[in-house]
Amino acid sequence: MLNEKKSVVDALVVDAHAHVFTHDMPVVANPRHNPNYDFTPEQYLAIMDAHGVQFAVLAAGSPWADYNDYMIAALRKHPRLRGTVIVEPSAEKYTLEAMARDGVVGVRLSFITMQDIPDLSAFAWRRFLRRLRDLDWHVHLHIDGPRLPRVLPHFEAAGVKLVLDHYGRPDPVRGIQCEGFQAMLRAIERGRTWVKVSAGYRLGEERVAAYGRELLRTVGAERLLWASDCPFVGDEEATTYRRTMETVDAWMPDATTRRKVFGENALKLYFS
Amino acid sequence: MIQPAAADAPAVDTHAHIYTLDMPMSGEAWHKPPADASAEQYLQALDAHGVGYAVMAAASIYGDYNDYMIDAVRRHQRLRTTVIVEPTTDPYILRQMRDDGVVGVRLQWRSLKTTPDLSAPEYQRFLRRVRDLDWHVHLHDEGARLPPAIAHLEAAGVKLVIDHFGRPSAHLGTACPGFQAVLRSVQNGRTWVKLSAGYRLPSPAVAAACAAALLEHAGPERLLWGSDWPFAAFEDKVSYADTVADLRTWVPDAAARARIGGETAFRLFFT
């Protein structure tokens, strides 16, 4: 059974996006999800091992807001893991530096859950983005594609690295023609933006194959990061870890591209 | 052109700014610098004039983005700095700043229409923390507004450093109530005054008169010298050598000048 689940990729594999939590962690009011079970770092590491995944990046989850503490404890214990956190833009240099020493590599902005996006031109945000750049961190942005063009110039002006979740979440009807998707392609070409090819189970596997092929065709493989989004909160029963790999493997044209998307790119971005 | 180092150059420059143009500027910035003034450029200026040590002043145009200066004091043992912080800043953060080489907080009020109420509980707590850290408050404001601020800071028991002679007003000069309050304050033993940025004063004569009054009332153990490098808004009009020469004009006695440029500043910022 375990052998059968081995990686679809015969090379180093890095999972760029997964969550760990326990059911008794403090949850914000009206959370996007509220899992009633635990998914511990140990459970996750066992899944990584079973699928030939060596390294992984834990993503802060919006239900727990800036209670990053459980995740940070996991980073301290397991050198195979890195993480992104949710913090206020007023976070002090010293606090962020302490987090960096523990394995934090970026800040997650979950704008997808916000009706009003904060004013990124305000001094507090420019100062914050500059601090992230000083740390060589990345902004880990979860936003609906149509709103991406509005915020993208602020991140690019700040000179901070940017990682977009889930193919940039293009408008499902307009797909690759969506202005957000097109803006993302242009940003990737400028060299400081990456995108996760992940959450096909949320966006539709056929759709994401089209997104993936368009990304390869226009900007190449260097900025694409495979991620599982484990444990597939809200879709735990229907999705398997192996399936998240196969969904992306389906549009890999060759072994070199596969090695980059499944491991090399993420290793460079998050672990060096 | 590199000017030869003066034989009697001050040992410590107690007022200068460093920044790069790509740093985040606050919305209320009063001045937009024309070029980078990096830590490396500043160290070159110090070396070119034989100045060994320096204290950087937080600049209001970058708000509380003190990060660049903190990185510089971590790297260079010969540098110290002041910071601009919210009064609510956590004491653990302040302590880490001190360990890195921060020696005080700047109240840069000159560009503010209304100044904060230092008697408010959050400022009282903040000033106590500043005192606990043995930091100084580094106050820059119009001479006319200095007296009440000085009174609050004296009551809080913090060390106080007044920028640029106390910025006396043009028509009153040494008779300016702010300058008079500075003269009284230095006698309490916890207030120092910077002989610096003479070019920002109404005239060279006012600067010279203020310097003479300060030497008489305060003496060299309460006076400091600062270059104010890179001379914000006067970048093309003032040179580092000019500011060294100014000190010689204001303090003709070599022994007094040596104390102002050396021992007084060392004791206050480096011990």
Image (tube, rainbow, N blue to C red):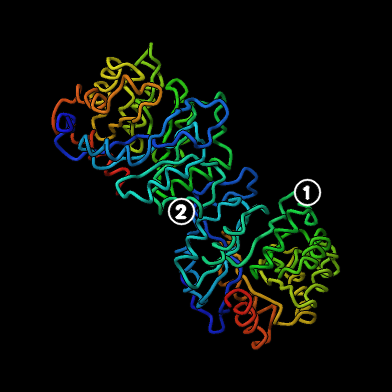
Q: What residue is rendered at 79% in x and 65% in y?
A: B150
Element assignment for label 1: loop
State the separation of the CA atoms marked 1 and 2.
34 Å
In this figure, which residue is indicated by the disc labeled 1? B114
Among the 4 quarters of the image, the one containing residue B96: bottom right
Q: What residue is rendered at 57% in x and 45% in y?
A: A90
Q: What residue is rendered at 54% in x and 28% in y?
A: A117
Which mark's residue is nearer the viewer, 1 or 2? Answer: 2
1 and 2 marks in contact (CB < 8 Å): no
Image x and y of residue A16, in percent = 32, 36
In this figure, which residue is indicated by the disc labeled 2? A97
Above/below status of B231 relative to A55: below
Q: Nearer the viewer, residue A151 or A170?
A: A170
Element assignment for label 2: helix
From this viewpoint, is residue B198 visible?
Answer: no
Q: Is label 1 on the same chain as label 2?
A: no
Above/below status of A177 relative to A19: above
Q: How many marks?
A: 2
Image x and y of residue A75, in percent = 37, 47
Extreme top residue here?
Answer: A173
Q: Label 2: chain?
A: A
Q: Nearer the viewer, residue B218 or B159?
A: B159
Among the 4 quarters of the image, the one containing residue B157: bottom right
Q: Nearer the viewer, residue B62 or B65?
A: B65
Judge from the rendering whether residue B257 lies leftward or rightward of residue B11; answer left or right.
right
Residue A23, label in figure: none
Q: Residues within 10 Å of mark 1 (few under 14, many from 20)?
A: few
Judge from the rendering whether residue A223 lies leftward or rightward of residue B37; answer left or right.
left
Judge from the rendering whether residue B22 lies leftward or rightward of residue A166; answer left or right.
right
Among the 4 quarters of the image, the one containing residue A8: top left
Amino acid type assigned to the residue bearing label 2 in the image: Glu
